[in-house]
């Protein structure tokens, strides 16, 4: 802390250490360069929790259990990473004229003044375990910021609306995340962002964007693979069986998505348990009949008559020949919508027109 004699005196006043303990702490502080509080903890004279408790009592400010804090990543991004870690400050939330922070050292006037000047708001203080604040900050910043992932997913969704891309793939490496899209037999790489991300980060990002989804996951030696199927719930299915080939899959009552080309084969999303990420999906009987299945366009049966189809058909962009340009929104394809009752032959002819 900035005024370590004060914390020593406070600990003595609360009967947590005696004069000899304080002298030992000051000696170790001079020898090791530790803060006095850290020196007393290392000597076993007092615990970090006791120091935090004394400070909150003496200064009449709340003491926060750092383990229970939900980090406001957007608010963290307004301040320098090094400053927050060095001073062990965790911004919690801000109002029109006030910002709430958890800080290890409530006597750190220079750091508090900096927050006030940078935010233009009055600081509301709480104390917390400094080591846990630092660990939480390092862990959060090591992910390169959830906002970057949220923005990337938002950009991806905007690009693939009104297209045949119904699936978003995330290849999670140690220090990067690759985002691809898939649909109508086309796999297209769109973005690659730096940072270490997990499947939970991806799901949290979709939740932040208020996009419901179904997903699958797989793992290999050096990467993780998460497949997300965004759900739209805006399409009226005129008749089933049906084929959907567009952004935003749907799941009407008593239907399921299938990777099967015939009834009775394994399904991508069996209904014997709720699917995480889609709060409106209830448990259903997984033994649905062939007539009640909704297929994605890439898993349509080889031969069918009078299926309802709601899809976007891709045509290679004439300007870039599929490479991706401004004209096609970097997708390499343009899309035209088909909707109605078709046979497998009709669908194949439509896709061949590409």
Image (cartoon, rainbow, N blue to C red):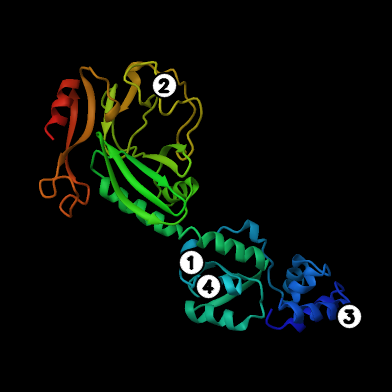
Q: Quadrant of residue 6?
A: bottom right
As rendered, which of 35 and 201 lies closer to the eye?
35
Sequence-first tag of 4 and 1: 1
Quadrant of the image for the C terminus? top left
Sequence-first tag of 1 and 3: 3
Distance from disc 3 to disc 2, alpha carbons, whole Å, reads: 73 Å
Sequence-first tag of 3 and 2: 3
Distance from disc 4 to disc 1, alpha carbons, whole Å, reads: 15 Å
Residue carrying label 3: 19
317 relative position to 188: left or right:
left
107 relative position to 315: left or right:
right
Distance from disc 2 to disc 4, alpha carbons, whole Å, reads: 51 Å
Q: Do we see residue 343 in this rendering?
A: no
Q: Quadrant of residue 125?
A: bottom right
Sequence-first tag of 1 and 2: 1
Sequence-first tag of 4 and 3: 3
Residue carrying label 1: 75
Identify the residue shown where x is 46% and y is 63%: 74
Disc ID at residue 233 = none
Identify the residue shown where x is 47% and y is 24%: 284
As rendered, which of 174 and 253 lies closer to the eye?
174
CB under 8 Å between callouts 4 and 3?
no
* Badge 3 element: helix
Disc ID at residue 266 = 2
329 relative position to 72: left or right:
left
Identify the residue shown where x is 42% and y is 37%: 215
Disc ID at residue 82 = 4
60 relative position to 203: left or right:
right
Q: Residues within 10 Å of mark 3 (few under 14, many from 20)?
A: few
């Amino acid at each position: 802390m900035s005024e370590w004699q004060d914390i020593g005196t406070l600990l003595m006043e609360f009967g947590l250490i005696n004069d000899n303990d304080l002298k030992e702490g000051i000696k170790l502080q001079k020898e090791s360069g530790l803060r006095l509080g850290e020196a007393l903890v290392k000597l076993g004279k007092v615990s970090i929790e006791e120091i935090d408790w004394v400070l909150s009592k003496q200064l009449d400010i709340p003491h926060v259990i750092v383990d229970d804090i939900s980090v406001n990543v957007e608010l963290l991004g307004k301040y320098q990473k090094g400053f927050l870690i060095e001073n062990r400050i965790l911004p919690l939330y801000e109002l029109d004229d006030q910002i709430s922070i958890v800080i290890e050292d409530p006597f750190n006037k220079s750091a508090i003044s900096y927050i006030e000047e940078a935010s233009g708001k009055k600081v509301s203080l709480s104390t917390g375990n400094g080591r846990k604040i630092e660990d939480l900050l390092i862990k959060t910043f090591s992910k390169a910021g959830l906002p970057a992932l949220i923005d990337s997913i938002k950009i991806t969704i905007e690009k693939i609306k009104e297209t045949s891309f119904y699936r978003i793939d995330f290849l999670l490496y140690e220090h990067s995340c690759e985002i691809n899209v898939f649909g109508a037999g086309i796999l297209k790489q769109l973005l690659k962002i730096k940072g270490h991300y997990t499947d939970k980060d991806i799901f949290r990002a979709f939740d932040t964007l208020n996009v419901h989804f179904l997903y699958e996951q797989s793992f290999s030696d050096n990467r993780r693979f998460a497949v997300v199927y965004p759900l739209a719930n805006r399409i009226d299915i005129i008749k089933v069986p049906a084929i959907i080939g567009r952004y935003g899959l749907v799941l009407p009552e008593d239907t399921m998505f299938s990777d099967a080309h015939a009834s009775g084969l394994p399904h991508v999303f069996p209904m014997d348990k709720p699917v995480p990420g889609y709060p409106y999906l209830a448990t259903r009987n997984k033994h649905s009949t062939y007539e009640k299945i909704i297929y994605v366009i890439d898993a349509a049966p080889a031969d069918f008559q009078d299926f309802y189809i709601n899809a976007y058909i891709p045509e290679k962009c004439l300007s870039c020949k599929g490479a991706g340009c401004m004209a096609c929104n970097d997708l390499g394809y343009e899309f035209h919508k088909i909707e109605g009752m078709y046979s497998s032959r009709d669908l194949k002819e439509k896709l061949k027109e590409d």
